[in-house]
Image (cartoon, rainbow, N blue to C red):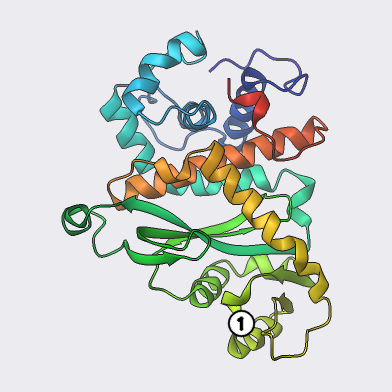
Amino acid sequence: MAKGVDDPFVTTDLNTLLTALYVKIDDWLGRPRRTGRPPMLSDAELLTMAVAQVLLGVRSEARWLRFLPRVLPGAFPYLPGQSGYNKRLRAAVPLLRRAIRAVATDTDLWSDTTWIIDSTPVECGRSRATAKRSNLAGWAGYGYCSSHSRFFWGLRLHLICTPSGLPVTWALATPKIDERQVLTAVLDHDPNLLSDRPGLLILADKGYVSAELDRWLTDRGVRLLRPSYRNRTPRPGEHLLKSVRQLIESVNDTLKGQLDLELHGGRSDAGVTARVAQRLLAMTAAIWHNRATGQPVTRSLTAYDH
């Protein structure tokens, strides 16, 4: 993808966002360490192409590769086949994770000392036959979605983000694992997240009620604020939680309503993870670009979906 733009932050449209994102990722990756012949599609082009796909709402990879030359003519000098694109995307899961972090840390929102934590279902199938024969069997499982009062078969996306929706860290887990266990595991895996933020406040719902979790976070200088049970005295600052549910639902609506999180189409561990990461990178990129261009709605995708 060509870099021929003097100032990538001139306006807010899809071409400008993709150009700015490509330049950001290409500069971040630097020179490739591998020796020999470089790939015809660079890593920066692969990630930019993946972001464009979900922003434009094209779920089929084969259809996307046919559609791409018409909607973004000349943007990508080389287009792989559907199989090659799928393999590259699945193999790029670690790169997608690091790219989300690289783009997120390039915003002023990254230093926010208030986080929101919640989990949302990522359905992977509906029939019993699918649950038995799927390659996801053993990782995916049955869970209950209280927001929609229904059971589902799949995974849960545990997302920690800022109040604006900027992803801080995330994990996919079977619905059978307790949300509190996932939270401690995610933060334990990346301890620098907590050490870099003195006085951090995490806002959560009643699913994170646990004296043990409170102690674990307190030992690390973190305060967890979640609603008290009706027979308990409200904790100081609990009034802040009144709008938290709306913030969480708003972020989930962006992922599911605009980025088709529940229609990911992944059929393997790597496939589902890559497609979820693809959508999180797209949301992160939109927030990053909107923030850089001074847009009034930080998480708006309207300018990039056509």
119 left or right of 198 in image: left
Tell me the residue at 60%/40% (across/down): 283
Q: Is residue 173 above or below residue 15?
A: below
Indicate the position of residue 176 as horizontal and vertical percent values.
38, 72
**Residue 20 visible within the image:** no
Label 1 neighbour load within 10 Å: few <14, some 14-19, many 20+:
some
Tell me the residue at 21%/52% (across/down): 130
Task: Answer with the quarter of the image where residue 212 lies.
Answer: bottom right
Indicate the position of residue 4 as horizontal and vertical percent values.
65, 12
Q: Is residue 72 above or below residue 220?
A: above
The amino acid beneath tag 1 is: Val
Q: Is residue 204 above or below residue 262?
A: below
Q: Which residue is mark 1?
A: 209
**Residue 273 visible within the image:** yes
Q: Residue 83 versus residue 229: which sits nearer the camera?
A: 229
Tell me the residue at 66%/46% (across/down): 104
Indicate the position of residue 84 as horizontal and vertical percent values.
29, 28
Q: Residue 253 versus residue 58: which sits nearer the camera?
A: 253
Indicate the position of residue 217 as horizontal and vertical percent values.
66, 81
Q: Residue 154 versus residue 9: which sits nearer the camera?
A: 154
Q: Secondary structure at mark 1?
A: loop
Task: Answer with the quarter of the image where residue 177 lies.
Answer: bottom left
Tell me the residue at 73%/50% (across/down): 164
- In which quadrant will I find the C terminus? top right
Q: How many marks?
A: 1
142 left or right of 122 in image: left
The single residue placed furthest to the front in the displayed view is 149
60 left or right of 255 in image: left
